[in-house]
Every structure is written in C-alpha cells, then in structure tokens.
Image (spheres, grey):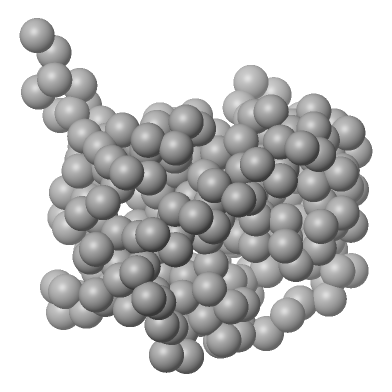
Amino acid sequence: MGILNVTPDSFSDGGNFTSLSAALRQIEKLIQEGADIIDIGGASSRPSADIVPVEEEWKRLEPAISHAIKEFPSIPISIDTWRAEVARRALDLGIHMINDISAGTLEPEIIFHTAKAKAPLIIMHMQGTPLTMQVKPEYGEVIVEIVEYLTQRINEVRKQGILDIIIDPGFGFGKTMEHTLSLIHNLKLICSLGVPVLTGFSRKSFLSKITGASALNTEPLHAILNYQALQAGVLFLRVHDVASAHQALAWYLKSNTK
C-alpha cells in the first residue's frame, strides 16, 4: 500500500504533493515501484496534529481521488480518514477502501457508509487522538489491551455489516518506544485474530530514535521491520517507499520458498 499525503503538514512529506500534477506523478511512481493499493490522506494524523475541517479535508482530497480513479482504474484507492462525511463522498466517487485511524469510534457513521458501499474497512488501534496520543501514553498490559480493543472493534464492525475488515495495531499512535518494541515482538498474536493485518512503520519517529537518522533516511531499518512483519503473518505493508518494501517482500518470498 503506497502512501500519498495531499496535506501541507504531514510529518515527513507535507506539502510535496498538494498540487494535482505532483499527486498524480507520485501515484504513478508508487505504482511503477509495485504498489497494489494507493492510500490517500487529506489530513495529517501526526502527533499533536490539529483537526482539519471537513470541507478543507475534502478540498484537498477530491481532485486527487477523481483523477486517480480515472487515470489508474486498475489500482484500488483507499482513503485515510476518520470523517464520516469525507468517507461518504469518497465512496460515492468510487474509491474502494476506507482507512480509519479511529476504528470507527470518532464518527461512527463512517461504518454505516462503508457497509452501505460494501467496501473494506481498515480499523486501527490508537490511544487518544492525534492531538493527545503521544502525551504520556500508558497501558496496564499493552499487548492485552490492544488485542482486546481490536477484537471488540472487529465484532462491532461486523455487527454493522462490514465483512472485509483489516486491522492495524497502530505503530506510532499512542505508544512509547517500549510499547512499540513489545508490539513488534508480538505481531504473531495480532495476526492470530482471524482478519488480515496491516502495519505502518514507514518514517515513524521511533525509527529515527533507534537509528539517529532523519525520517527520510530510515529505510534500512524499515525494510528489516517489513520483513519481520511478513514473517509474523502481516498481509499489508503501508509504506512511503514502495521499492524498498518490494525488496523486503522479494527476500521474504525467496527465503520461505521450499
């Protein structure tokens, strides 16, 4: 899953793809590198990010969505949003998937719209909101609490008619370095919940803390983590650098071929 941020303030590439021409060039690049899905976001979910009004988020998203569907018809388009109205409009335009960092808790109507469109829904674990999530996150037993939360949300979303569910444990969303490392070590448990799992390590701050490198220069560690995720049973890798992820996938397939 290749990431496209059409935002002015995303943590690693804010402002790079706000023009339609730049956005379409980036989509083409991601596809050429091997992306199977494009995930487009119009509102930053970085730590301490402010809430973007619905109309502003839609103003950023609509041109990229409309043209992407027309120019790349064979590629599924996902929208990274927790806003029910944004999701409804995007689904009406013909996008294929909703990626909700709140797992349908901030605006529950998003579940209704996704179910009505018979689209898949990605539900993520997050403690708090982007504005508060990294302000001293605390857990009793981090893995137990994440598993319980995701299980509860899977059941709730299913009750409301969505059968195609993908879960994301939420790296970088309300988790300290200790929480993150524990989650990495327990990915197999997350993958045992009976639905496909997505991981999003790409350019997260914990990579920079480990390596001392800037977000844009953490691809070597990111590739290692992608390989570990695949070994654990993860089916979707959400990444900025698709080429690097493909190398990790190629090595995984090669090393696991008997």
From the viewer's side, name the closer residue of 227 and 160: 160
Q: In this view, does 231 lie above or below 189?
A: above
Residue at 61% x, 43% y is: 154
- Which residue is the extreme one toward the top? 258
Q: In this view, does 35 lie to the left or right of 210?
A: right
Residue at 72% x, 56% y is: 104
Residue at 21% x, 34% y is: 231
Q: In which quarter of the image is residue 65?
A: top right
Residue 36 visible in the displayed image: yes
Residue 93 visible in the displayed image: no
Residue at 24% x, 63% y is: 182
Give the x, y percent position of residue 52.
Answer: 76, 77
Q: Is residue 165 above or below residue 22?
A: above
From the viewer's side, name the closer residue of 9 and 223: 223
Q: In this view, does 53 lie to the left or right of 140?
A: right
Give the x, y percent position of residue 167.
Answer: 52, 45
